[in-house]
Image (cartoon, rainbow, N blue to C red):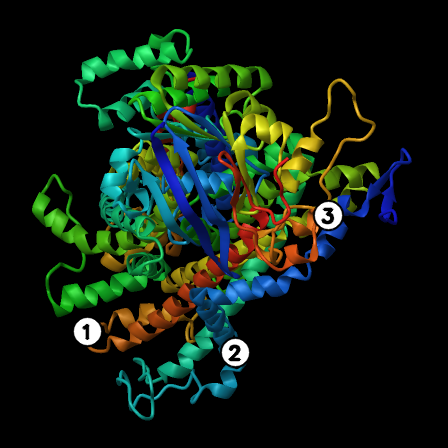
Amino acid sequence: MEPARGVRTVDGDVLPVEAVGVARHNAQTPAYARLWRRFCRNKGAVFGLVVFLAIVFMALFADLISPYNPLIQNYARPMEGPSVDHWLGTDSFGRDMLSRIIHGARIALVVGILAVLLAMLIGVTLGLISGYYGGLTDTIIMRVMDGLFAFPILILAIALMAVMGFGVRNVIIAVAIVSIAPFARVTRGDVLAVREEPYIEAARLAGISNRAIIWRHVLPNVLAPIIVQGALRVSAAIITESGLSFLGLGPPPPTPVWGSMIAEGRNFIVMAPHISTYPGIALMITVVGLNLFGDGLRDVLDPKLKS
Amino acid sequence: MGFFILRRIGQTLVVLAIASIIVFTLMRLIPGDPIQIIMGSEYSKEAEAELRRQLGLDRPIVVQYLVWVGNVVRGEFGYSYLNHERVSVLLWQAFLPTVCLVIGTTIVGLLLALPSGIIAAVKKDTVWDYGSMGFAITAYSMPSFWKGIILIWIFGVYLGWFPIMGYVHPWVNLSESLWKLTLPSLTLGTFFSGLVARITRSSLLEVLDQDYIKAARARGVRHTMLVAKHALRNALIPVVTVIGLQFGTLLGGAVLTETVFTIPGLGRLTVAAILNREYQIVQGAVLLGVVFVVGVNLLVDLAYGFLHPKIRVQ
Amino acid sequence: MTETLLEVRNLRVAFHNEDGMLRAVDGVSFGVARGEIVGLVGESGAGKTLTAEAIMRLIRCPPGRISGEVLYRGRDLLALDEAELADIRGKDIAMIFQNPISSLNPVFRVGAQLLEAMTLHLPARRRTLRDRVREIFTHVGIPSAERRAQDYPHQFSGGMCQRAMIGMGIACTPSLLIADEPTTALDVTIQAQILALIRQLAAELGMAVLLVSHDLGIISQMCSRVLVMYAGQIVEEAPMATIFHAPAHPYTRGLMACIPDIEQVPARLGTIAGVMPGLRDLPSGCRFHPRCPIAEPHCAVAEPALRALDVTHRVACHLARRE
């Protein structure tokens, strides 16, 4: 039997390559196909993925697939129900609902994804540092996260917007700030567990710097729950953003945003319920889809971790 | 157990302190000079200096913070020039409706969530399970403000069963109060129940897999009692914790629900205050919201400690 | 002729899995007579625990499926409904498990759990049963029974938990106690005490015991008859002395050869080459043949049935002969 390839430590011992995290990560690659199969078995998750892709498609090609320009007003035909010309009817200004909903996907997605990416960047970094180094750094970071966490999301977002002013850019920042804490917590929790694994110890003994350890060994192994959290946070971000838009704090009219469209339609709920209803349905489908997708991801990724 | 209580209270105070610093910092970051806002456009240097001194704005920032905390603890939140009323009074008036809404929501939420979560777990992978969980996911994925509008349309306008706006204190007129609170509670309650149902289900499933359930079954405990007595007691403990954690989200939803149903609660007050640049109100309201959330979390943690013998009996 | 208490006929336990149907227990047949202590021995994964749990029908079906017959005093347990089963469990047949601490409900007091075990089956008054709780605790060796009954499981040590579990097992004087690896999770010194306790109670109550274990030492201390399991099947059944001194099946022989002789400490410990096959990769014919030192071509073709070498000795091997 040939000797296993090894990593020579400072003391001259040879540790098998399996003891080093990177090798473990590579050994996991063939399993991705299996994960995909398992994911597909969950019909809800597949639905979620389809919805997500559809939304992305709508956002990317909004200009191409919208029948009308969402901003053009037509006072001749306001508040019409669904018809051949306007599949989802028109709003109080005569604008085509379908086009506005399609364009609304753009804002929802941009805000959701950007905010979550930003939050992920900051939150995961904080979680990694906090979990890996521990001690006072950990305590301070976690207390601040607790402090952030104590705020009802929407109220904090509103307060932030009071400081920064309204508009898309600030919505993204506000939603991002509000989403940092969950990422930090989830990351830290898993880092605490991974930190005790033998291959981390082995890497440390082999003389690898802390930063390299975190980046190459710890991070790949805590990635799974972060991704799951990311998917779920995007749906939460979209809801928060639509809530802010509903209150009038989001992108100013006439930008088509689902939240503000619902708010506009509120006044006409009796005469033209479709103005509020359709954007709401779009919103709901998006969020349900993203949640199912996130759940599906969790079911696929977590049991693997548990075993 | 006593030590546990002390430790949790200590942690809570730390969190509150940090949260208050965040609130204070946020408010100080708001662009615009508060003096200008109060005095308008025409004022003299002397009057400005005088007002600045009066409001304590000429002292170092840390001192201002401490002064603010001192005032808050004494119940002094400032004065609203727009409403000609002390902020603390406004906050108190707004606090009660929000509390009522939250209580109504919690009741509706738990009544819906617990049975559906339990049934979904017990009848796992059947129609009951998928149906319950499907309903739960839909319930909490629906934006609450939209749900409110739809409920208003169907039950308020179309069917005319419930009033669609306003609020009455329960002690003023109980029946009308309940009637007016029904739709809002349903709106927020279904959202809340979605979250709780899922946690109930997964918690119960996890408990049902445990060794002690198998051992109890081996002793002859029947299925119903197995679930109702042996499993539930254990399964509900993490559910209680999650309820506490989700309370913040609930309060956020309350903001929107109050706007939709025109309930004069904290949420509406906050939003109006922001739009009117009444930052003292925003400061106070946000802080109050945080205290509310943190307080509930503390209660939940203490309840957890009480329910779990490992902590109760050291 | 001692009455046969339990007769298992052709027991099969299968599981639905994403990869298909896996047979974890495949055609197991044996009997337990009144008052005897029978050992079910095998490696981890051989199917011993599943066999024991299948007898009590504690396996979740679906995804599991149990077939065959399990006759307790003539009644087929697999044909009973849940209510009738619940009646028998705890009262006629009791079971204790491998991990005593996690087998107790953490939110109820230990005494209360024992009390419940009795109120389920015994018609006596609560007050009488409460006294009984104290008696049982003392009988199984839990000191300060009065105080201990008010404790929660996390306040008990592992050994004490197992004593409490045994107490719950014998509370309604069952005729059969199934003990699934009762000492695996305990210290060696506690192990001996628990085993002695089981032996003592079995003798006192005239109780039969089905002892499931992977530890040959425990089996040799306790059992009068031994069943050897391999890859979901019974490969040999014989009195204890025969198994240890004159085993017929190559697997059993291999197991015995692995036991180091304390008189002559060997240079290298004996092993059986290879690993027990997983459920997905079962070999054709005799399941042991890839690891068998005396395997012949025929062994890869036909599965050997469990046949009698003499009145008390059965083997599942084409090549086994009487010694």
User: Viewer-proximal residue, A103 or B267?
Assistant: A103
User: Which three-letter amino acid code belongs to the residue tagged 2?
Assistant: Phe
Across and down, in percent, residue C90 comes to 31, 30
**Circle 2 marks a residue in which chain?**
A
Mark yes or no: residue A194 visible: yes
Q: CA distance from mark 2 to mark 1?
A: 33 Å
Helix, strand or loop status at disc 1: loop
> Is residue B269 visible from the viewing direction of this image?
no
Q: Position of residue B45 (x, y in %)?
A: 50, 44
Q: Which mark is residue A217?
A: 3
Q: Is residue C308 left or right of residue C145?
A: right
Q: Quadrant of the N terminus of chain C?
A: top left
Q: Which residue is mark 1?
A: A270
Nearest to the eye among marks 2 and 3: give it: 3
Q: Is residue A38 above or below residue C317?
A: below
Which chain is home to disc 3? A
Q: Cα distance, mark 2 to mark 3? A: 35 Å
Q: How many marks?
A: 3
Q: Considering the numbered disc 2 on the image, is that residue within a helix, a strand or a loop?
A: helix
